[in-house]
Each structure stands twice: as structure tokens, then as C-alpha cells.
Amino acid sequence: MKEEPVRLGEEASPQNEELLLSLEARLHQGTDKWQRITAIDLITLSPSEAAITAMIYCLNDPDSDVRFAAVEGLGKLVNPESEAALADACHDSNYFVRKAAEEALRRIRAARA
């Protein structure tokens, strides 16, 4: 079953916002790529402007697995800011990141049509 992109709705609840801030800290301070990837996966579950900003930040991560996870996360959200970032990710140095970005853009554009 294909996943449909999620449209951003209301802002996260205060509890979710606190969790999101904790996860964002892991993205910025974490040295373990698996912590960063897990944080991206969890942030995707609570779509908000802050989540998008955090995932866009991860598109510049030195590890291609983290960039891939960020592309996958952004591909689940219908948002102009994520769409622009995914367009840039289509030029990533890693083949798999580029292909995931292209597929994510196709999904978002199809959901918007």
C-alpha cells in the first residue's frame, strides 16, 4: 500500500511540541547517525513547521543515510517549503538520495493535483 503525503494541519499540542524540541536537539547534537534517523522518523509522525525545518536541516547531514531519511520524511508532507528542499535534494551527491527525492516530489505533486 502506498503512503499518501500528509497535509499540515494544526500546530502540535504542547506535549508534542516538547517532544519535537527534544528530537530536534538530537538532530543537531547527535553524533550517532541512527539516533538522527530515528529522530527524523519520529518527527515525521507529528507534522509541523518545526518538523519540516528540522528535516530540511538534515538534508545537509554528512551521512547519506540521514539525508535519505530526511528526504523520505519530507516526502510524506505536502508543503511548499519541503517541496523546494526536495527539488534541491534531487542534486544530492548520493544516487539513492537523489532518486528518493525525485519519487517524493512525484508523490507530493500527484497528491496536490
Image (tube, rainbow, N blue to C red):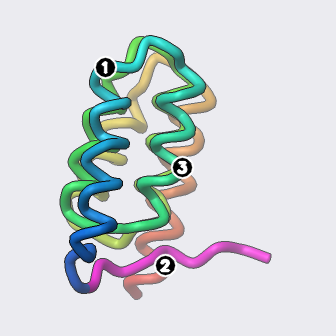
Q: Write down the residue under mark 1.
A: 29
Which residue does the image show at 31% across and 43% down from the upper left?
Answer: 22
Q: Which mark is residue 48?
A: none
In the picture, residue 28 is in which quadrant?
A: top left
Task: Tell me the distance, in whole angstroms, between the alpha carbons under discs 3 and 2.
Answer: 23 Å
Mark 2 vs mark 1, CA separation in Å: 35 Å
Figure label count:
3
SS category of the residue bearing label 2: helix
For marks 3 and 1, the one nearer the N-term is 1
**Mark 3: which amino acid?**
Asp
Relative vertical location of residue 62 with respect to residue 84 in this rendering, above or below: above
Q: Residue at x 19, y 62 (%)?
A: 49
Q: Looking at numbered disc 2 in the image, what kind of residue is underneath it?
A: Ala
Query: Which one is closest to the eye, mark 2 or mark 1?
Result: 1
**Element type where label 3 sits in the image:** helix
Mark 1: which secondary structure? Answer: helix
Give the side of residue 41 with respect to residue 79, left or right.
right
Chain-order first, disc 3 or disc 2: 3
107 shown above or below 28: below
The residue tagged 2 is 110
Main SS category, magenta section:
loop
Write down the quadrant of residue 43 in the picture: bottom left
Q: State the quadrant of the C terminus.
A: bottom left
Choose between 40 and 2: the one closer to the eye: 40
The mark lying in front, picked from 3 and 1, is: 1
Specify whether 91 is left or right of 64.
Answer: left
Packing grade of label 2 (10 A; few <14, some 14-19, many >=20) is few
For disc 3, the marked residue is 41
The three-letter code of the residue at mark 1 reads Gln
Which range of residues does the magenta coloring cover? 1-9
Please tell me how crowded label 1 is: few (under 14), some (14-19), or many (20+) other residues with Cα within 10 Å.
few
